[in-house]
Image (cartoon, rainbow, N blue to C red):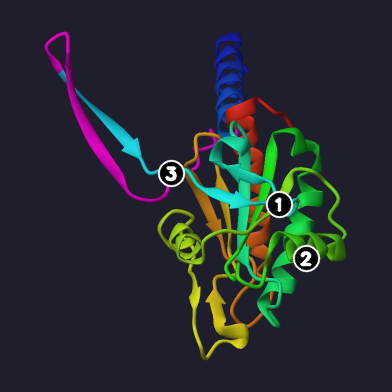
Amino acid sequence: MTKRAQNVSYLVLFLLTIATLVACQEEPVKPLPILGNYDLSYRTKDGKQIIDTIYQTIPDFQFYNEDSILVNKASFKNKVWISEFFFATCPSICPIMNTQLKNVEKALKSYSKDLQFLSFTIDPTHDTPSVLKAHKQKLGIQNKNWAFLSGNEAFTHQLGIEHFLIFAGREEEALGGYAHSGAFTLVDKKGRVRGVYEVVQPDLSINTKEYQRLIKEAKQLFQDEYNYSE
């Protein structure tokens, strides 16, 4: 092999190595979507029209927690929320949801400083704060960043459907008189819904892929909003 041919071979090998390294690099992770309705706002700056997207956020609310303390949206500000809608006397899907949310809490334990779990009862007539406190104790939940909330029934159902993007409502034919989704909702620190995860399905089975997606995307949200690292 001539010296020139040898140099060409080295150059080709070098270029192939660079191409391989570039190909092996991970693609940048896409930001999580922002779910729900949105509006467009138009303004002019320096003679140019600028379009701003205004995303739907969770509205203000007032509920009593399990300690009979009146709380609102500001009580949980600057935290990532993971929520469920349930009721304490539910004979079917709710106990499974509570258990799965406990598993989520364990999986995300290292993020607890900036994480808030919210369990909204859709049957506040029965689920008074004292009932919810007993329910929380029965589940063995001791951490302070998990609130069980009781408030106006109609507002709670509306909040779930229109803002947390899950179904919750009365249904006489359903077990316990209420029907609701087995999904958990992930909300960022600005109050925007970033994901809905049907972890517990209507047939009471666990959707492992949805559970794993929730854990993965919650961690991504913490990395994006709080600069957490794995």
Instruction: Please identify the dominant SS of the magenta region.
Output: loop
Q: SS at mark 3? A: loop
Q: Residues within 10 Å of mark 1 (few under 14, many from 20)?
A: some
| Residue lying at 50% horizontally and 47% vertically, measured from the top left | 61
Question: Between 32 and 89, which is closer to the camera in this rendering?
Answer: 89
Identify residue for label 1.
68
Identify residue for label 3.
34
Mark in front: 2 vs 3: 2
Q: CA distance from mark 2 to mark 1?
A: 24 Å
| Residue lying at 49% horizontally and 55% vertically, measured from the top left | 164
Identify residue for label 2.
99
Instruction: State the image coordinates of residue 23 (x, y, percent, origin top left).
Output: 56, 33
In magenta stretch: residue 27? yes
**First in sequence: mark 2 vs mark 1:** 1
Can you say which quadrant of the picture contains the N terminus? top right
Q: SS at mark 1? A: loop
